[in-house]
């Protein structure tokens, strides 16, 4: 399968979209791997950030997204860090989050791979690794650059909330009732109170 097929490109866009919202330094290794994959399939002039700008950000209405990049030996701009260094506005957060909540579709167009996105959001049987943290509802986990917080409603519905964590305490929660909660500041990444508030506004239920 070549990168030119829709499935491969959709999967690559999922990887960059979610990874670019993460704060884990290790994801820089993923950025280098994704850049290598793209250039190996489409040539040395292929640009990972340009692909994301043209195929993901602009179609959802983000016409300028700032990021940190490596600086190459000749002084030119290299690859985006992805693990950190993405500078977003509240509007950017809302648009990217809605794209994820809508299964990677925007105005009827499938931008991200629905299969890989469903896996990242725990909408399949696949699960990530435990983070070593837990709450009263279970163990937290991490998968495909998303953090997951377990939660059980008073009615007994158990779910897991996918989250994006940013440097300095930025937090975005993709609620199972399709609400989006986010906090910008240095309040850490504890999300349980935000999750409880979303459930009170519109109770979580299967099949949302």
Image (tube, rainbow, N blue to C red):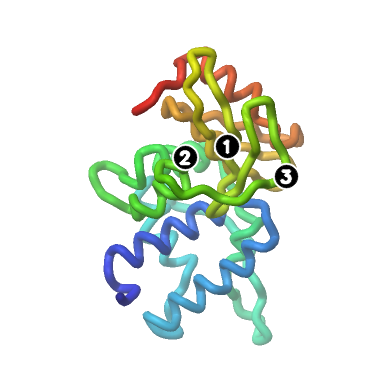
- Measure the C-alpha gap from mark 2 to mark 3: 26 Å
CA neighbours of label 1 inside 10 A, class few (<14), some (14 to 19), many (20+): many
Residue 21 visible in this rendered orientation of the protein: no
Q: Residue at x 67, y 55 (%)?
A: 24
Residue 130: x and y, percent? 65, 47
Above or below residue 207? Residue 43 is below
Q: Which numbered tag is attached to residue 132?
A: 3
Tell which circle, 2 or 3, labels the residue nearer the N-terminal end: 2
Measured in 3D between alpha carbons, the distance from the residue under mark 1 to the one under mark 3, in whole angstroms, is 20 Å
Which residue is tagged 1? 172
Q: Which mark is residue 97?
A: 2
The percent coordinates of residue 173 (x first, y second) are 55, 34
Above-or-below relation of 30 to 23 = below
Secondary structure beneath dot 2 equals helix
Q: Quadrant location of the C terminus?
A: top left
Residue 48 image label = none
The residue tagged with tag 3: helix, strand or loop? strand
Please rate how many residues cluster around mark 2, counting C-alpha atoms within 10 Å: few if below 14, some from 14 to 19, many from 20: many
Left or right position of 111 against 179: left
Pointers 2 and 1 in contact (C-beta within 8 Å): yes
Q: Is residue 207 left or right of residue 137?
A: left
- In contact (CB < 8 Å): disc 2 and disc 3: no
Left/right placement of residue 153 relative to residue 87 reads: left
C-alpha span from label 2 to label 1: 8 Å
Tell me if residue 43 comes above or below residue 163 in the rendering. Answer: below
Q: Secondary structure at mark 1?
A: strand
Q: Residue at x 43, y 83 (%)?
A: 40
| Residue 144 placement (x, y as % from top left) | 53, 54
């Amino acid at each position: 399968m070549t990168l030119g097929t829709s499935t491969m490109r959709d999967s690559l866009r999922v990887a960059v979209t979610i990874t670019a919202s993460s704060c884990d330094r290790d994801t820089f290794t993923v950025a280098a791997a994704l850049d290598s994959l793209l250039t190996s399939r489409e040539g040395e002039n292929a640009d990972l950030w340009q692909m994301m700008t043209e195929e993901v950000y602009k179609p959802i209405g983000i016409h300028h997204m700032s990021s940190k990049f490596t600086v190459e030996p000749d002084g030119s701009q290299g690859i985006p860090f992805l693990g950190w260094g993405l500078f977003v506005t509240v509007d950017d957060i809302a648009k990217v989050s809605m794209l994820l909540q809508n299964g990677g579709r925007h105005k009827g167009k499938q931008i991200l791979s629905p299969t890989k996105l469903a896996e990242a959001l725990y909408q399949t049987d696949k699960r990530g690794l435990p983070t070593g943290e837990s709450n009263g509802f279970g163990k937290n986990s991490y998968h495909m650059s998303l953090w997951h917080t377990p939660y059980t409603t008073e009615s007994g519905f158990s779910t897991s909330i996918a989250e994006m964590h940013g440097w300095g305490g930025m937090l975005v929660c993709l609620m199972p009732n399709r609400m989006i909660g986010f906090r910008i500041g240095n309040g850490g990444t504890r999300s349980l109170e935000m999750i409880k508030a979303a459930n009170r506004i519109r109770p979580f239920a299967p099949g949302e």
